[in-house]
């Protein structure tokens, strides 16, 4: 039976996660509709931390420059306990990591992603609510309702629910959302202060009582603007949403998470906390917005079923410790989008989309468990070395070893299958008069076969990869330092500084790396053969398959 599809993918929710999914789908030529029940973008600086891994994703998509120009750097954190300054935390990463930590208000992140999506002729359908859906083996039928009350039925191949902690998609799909809420309430405020603390540093000031328990807290994250910060602090009793008799009841779904309605904190409430905890006498001004918020920790039992999937807060919620939430959701979207694009294009293995749950749910579980542990016990609860902790918080250690899509991760130095492909510099080519980075080669591509070594073997492997994947794998040759580039075969570059050889732990022998569209290594073959390569590609591609 033939099916007529109004679109390929419906994305429910136009926050950073939904917009990332939609932008990546459209960038790969997939028809997409993005619906959001809100009539306009919310002007709140909720999620503000941008991790280095997120900037790498945006680099690959082609929008990193816009984000960098709008954001401010995060150099580290200044900490104070009972007015006593603690050792400064500096956010330092290895030199091969191309981006540092940044801060950007969530509404600016959404603006940038919305503008990027618009380049592909797709806009957000505001005031449009997803009412219900049903799916079958061939697709999903989605019922939408516009702000005017008009109803529409859309037939799509897939539905992705990025519709937040109270996700309609998650509920209607019947996914469980196990966890609970923290009893504490906090207040947020976006203000300017006139202290002389160094710019680019967050501030964490707390007071401990006689028993060592934290009974007062102030956390400040820098934002673009002179002396501007997003501040969070404990809520005074008079502003407690739970204590307000006229305040809202808990949501009907039992999930208490995010901004609360009710009386918003005034500038005087924020000033009172600063008077108690600020490391310098200061006056707060220019309050842009404020709210009371609650925190829960929950995760779904699976990230989707059939042709309906969930991502971001629809799949996992947790404390904001370490700015992991939005960034984890963006990686959800990044992971699922390339798989859906391949499935819609008809070249995917039948289990490719199902691998989204296999790869991302373990990541979500780890983030929820770790952020809860850090929120309740402090980061000292994880006695790991500072370098590892910094890489983990930057989300540079997220990986998929054990995934059904990657080859077994054998022991040995260098990145293994399932690991993030590290960047490196010093690659030269015939025409470019400046050194390139590896990420310059990977930008705006899908699967890339990297062949390291010297000799004339590249064409055979490049042909095998392209033939098996129906042209969906590009090949780049990287030759050792001192080699001459060869223009007769696949694009070739010289590792003039030896950084690729060092970071990828390759020697004189021929080694092949298959890098996925999301920048993770799928296979490491040394020495590679066409049979080994096509056996690996068969985990992802199915020639002549249909979606």
Image (cartoon, rainbow, N blue to C red):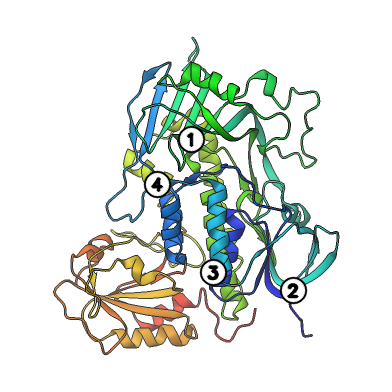
Q: CA distance from mark 2 to mark 4?
A: 43 Å
Which residue has dot 2 on it?
Answer: 137
Mark before the other along the chain sequence, 2 or 4:
4
Q: From the viewer's perspective, is residue 453 above or below residue 330?
A: below
* Horizontal side, residue 158 vs residue 278: left or right: right
Mark before the other along the chain sequence, 1 or 4:
4
Q: Nearer the viewer, mark 2 or mark 4?
A: 4
Q: Residue 278: x and y, percent?
A: 45, 21
Mark before the other along the chain sequence, 3 or 4:
4
Query: Which structural element holds mark 2?
Result: loop
Q: CA distance from mark 3 to mark 2?
A: 21 Å
Which residue has dot 1 on it?
Answer: 229
Which residue has dot 3 on it?
Answer: 338
Q: Residue 67: x and y, percent?
A: 45, 55
Mark before the other along the chain sequence, 3 or 2:
2
- Can residue 120 be seen by looking at this rendering? yes
Mark before the other along the chain sequence, 1 or 3:
1
Q: Are marks 3 and 2 in contact (CB under 8 Å)?
A: no
Which residue has dot 4 on it?
Answer: 101
Please name the residue shown 64% across and 74% down the image: 31
Q: Nearer the viewer, mark 1 or mark 4?
A: 1
């Amino acid at each position: 039976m033939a099916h007529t599809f109004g679109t390929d993918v419906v994305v429910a929710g136009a926050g950073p996660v939904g917009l990332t999914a939609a932008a990546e789908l459209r960038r790969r030529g997939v028809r997409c509709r993005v619906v959001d029940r809100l009539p306009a973008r919310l002007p709140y600086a909720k999620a503000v931390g941008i991790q280095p891994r997120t900037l790498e994703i945006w680099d690959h998509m082609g929008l990193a420059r816009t984000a960098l120009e709008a954001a401010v750097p995060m150099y580290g954190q200044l900490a104070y306990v009972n007015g006593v300054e603690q050792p400064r935390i500096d956010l330092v990463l290895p030199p091969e990591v191309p981006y540092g930590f940044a801060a950007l208000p969530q509404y600016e992140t959404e603006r940038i992603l919305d503008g990027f999506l618009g380049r592909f002729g797709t806009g957000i359908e505001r005031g449009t609510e997803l009412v219900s859906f049903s799916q079958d083996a061939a697709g999903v039928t989605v019922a939408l309702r516009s702000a005017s009350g008009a109803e529409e039925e859309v037939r799509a191949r897939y539905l992705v629910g990025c519709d937040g902690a109270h996700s309609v998609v998650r509920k209607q799909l019947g996914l469980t959302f196990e966890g609970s809420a923290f009893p504490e309430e906090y207040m947020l405020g976006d203000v300017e202060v006139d202290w002389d603390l160094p710019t680019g540093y967050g501030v964490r000031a707390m007071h401990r009582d006689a028993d060592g328990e934290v009974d007062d807290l102030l956390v400040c994250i820098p934002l673009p603007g002179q002396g501007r910060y997003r501040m969070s602090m404990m809520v005074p009793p008079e502003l407690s949403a739970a204590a307000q008799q006229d305040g809202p009841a808990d949501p009907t779904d039992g999930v208490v998470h995010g901004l609360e309605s009710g009386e918003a904190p005034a500038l005087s409430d924020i000033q009172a906390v600063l008077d108690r905890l600020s490391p310098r006498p200061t006056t707060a001004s220019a309050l842009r917005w404020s709210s009371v918020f609650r925190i829960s920790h929950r995760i779904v039992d699976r990230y989707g079923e059939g042709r309906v999937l969930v991502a971001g807060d629809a799949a996992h919620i947790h404390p904001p410790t370490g700015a992991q939430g939005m960034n984890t959701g963006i990686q959800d979207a990044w992971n699922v989008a390339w798989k859906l694009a391949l499935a819609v294009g008809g070249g995917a293995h039948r289990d490719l989309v199902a691998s989204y749950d296999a790869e991302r749910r373990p990541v979500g579980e780890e983030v929820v468990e770790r952020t809860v542990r850090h929120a309740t016990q402090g980061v000292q609860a994880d006695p790991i070395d500072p370098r590892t902790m910094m890489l983990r918080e930057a989300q540079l250690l997220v990986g998929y070893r054990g995934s059904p899509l990657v080859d077994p991760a054998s022991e040995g130095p260098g990145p293994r299958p399932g690991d993030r492909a590290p960047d490196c510099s010093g690659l030269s080519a015939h025409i470019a008069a400046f050194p390139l980075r590896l990420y310059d080669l990977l930008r705006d591509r899908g699967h890339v076969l990297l062949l390291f070594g010297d000799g004339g073997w590249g064409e055979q492997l490049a042909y095998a990869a392209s033939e098996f994947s129906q042209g969906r794998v590009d090949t780049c040759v990287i030759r050792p330092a001192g080699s001459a580039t060869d223009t007769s075969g696949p694009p070739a570059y010289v590792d003039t500084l030896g950084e690729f050889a060092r970071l990828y732990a390759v020697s004189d022998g021929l080694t092949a790396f298959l890098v996925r569209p999301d920048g993770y290594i799928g296979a490491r073959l040394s020495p590679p053969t066409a049979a080994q390569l096509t056996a690996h590609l068969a985990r992802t591609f199915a020639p002549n398959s249909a979606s």
